[in-house]
Amino acid sequence: MLSYPKHVWSWLRDWLPYVLPAISNLILVLLGVIMSLPALAEKVEKTPKYRKCLAAICLIAGVIGFIFDVAQRHSSDETNKQLIENVGITLKKTDELVQQTTGMLATTNQMATTVAVYMPQIAEMNSHVAAIDKQLKTTNDPRLIADLQAQKAEVQKQAAAISKRMSIALVPEIVHQMRDAHSNYLDEAFRLYNETDSLTSGPWTPETPQKLTEKLTEVKADRLRLDNRYRDELKEMVSTADYLRRQLLQVIPQTDEDKAEEQSFSAAINGDTKSFDVWKATKYLESLAQRNR
């Protein structure tokens, strides 16, 4: 029962600002018709009840028109204000995204530079090992075979040392990238929470429930996109970090912590990023690099 009057009021509130000018024009037309008919005009003028009724109609129509006109102007101003705020929020999001992308590109460039320094050395060592293997297949001299095997072992040792130095050098960069991505994700999630909190903590108006519902729907969609983007970024970074982890574990004894982190990294690579503790994983990588120094 209560929903019907609310529906009628909502309909009147939406349409009266458009209908009232036509009603006012209709009243003016009726007054003009009355005034153009002398007998009717005289009758109205001589009958106090008719005069009062006509005056009341004009007065009520004018007051209602004034109220709805002011309300419509206020609603229009609020809509424009909200639109400007939304544009500002969108621009801020774009600026933050550009900054995050710039930071990630800088870190990626640093990693690429580090790899470019070490990879040619490793490639040269691998070529040397391949040449030694080729020589081993073409000789039966025991002394030459022993000498070549010693050379091969030494080259492999040097290649392992270079690979370890590269991995140690890459750890701070991937750690920074993972922590930065995680901090940006938390900041964006907190900002989305504040968007809905500002509506519930502000002044309550008849439009608040509808605005809150629309904002919650919008925030829910934004949060889903944010979670999916962060999951994809984190999986890629964890894959790189896991490669470094495995490289650094080749030359040192493994501990129970190493085995536990192996499971954690593997789960994140397979898509379980929600339970992946970025700060714990990055501290572990730093500790692992320190154990290899």
Image (spheres, rainbow, N blue to C red):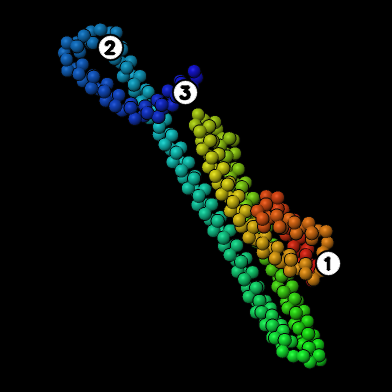
Q: Is residue 83 above or below residue 181?
A: above
Q: Nearer the viewer, residue 183 or 225?
A: 225
Q: Which residue is mark 1?
A: 253
Q: Which residue is mark 2?
A: 51
Q: Amino acid at mark 2?
A: Arg
Q: Is mark 1 in CB contact (under 8 Å) with mark 2?
A: no
Which is nearer the N-term, disc 2 or disc 3? Answer: 3
| Place of residue 142 in the rendered image (x, y in percent of width and height, measured from the top left) | 81, 90
Q: Amino acid at mark 3?
A: Lys
Looking at the rendered structure, which numbered label has been put on residue 6? 3
- How far separated are the C-alphas under marks 3 and 1? 74 Å
Dot 3 surroundings within 10 Å: few (below 14), some, or many (20 or more)? few
Label 2: which secondary element: helix
Label 1: which secondary element: loop
Which is nearer the N-term, disc 1 or disc 2? Answer: 2
- How far separated are the C-alphas under marks 2 and 3? 34 Å
Q: Nearer the viewer, residue 218 or 106?
A: 218
Label 3: which secondary element: helix
Residue 102 seen in this snapshot: yes
Dot 2 surroundings within 10 Å: few (below 14), some, or many (20 or more)? some
In the image: residue 240, left or right of residue 291: left
**Residue at 57 percent of width and 39 percent of height:** 196
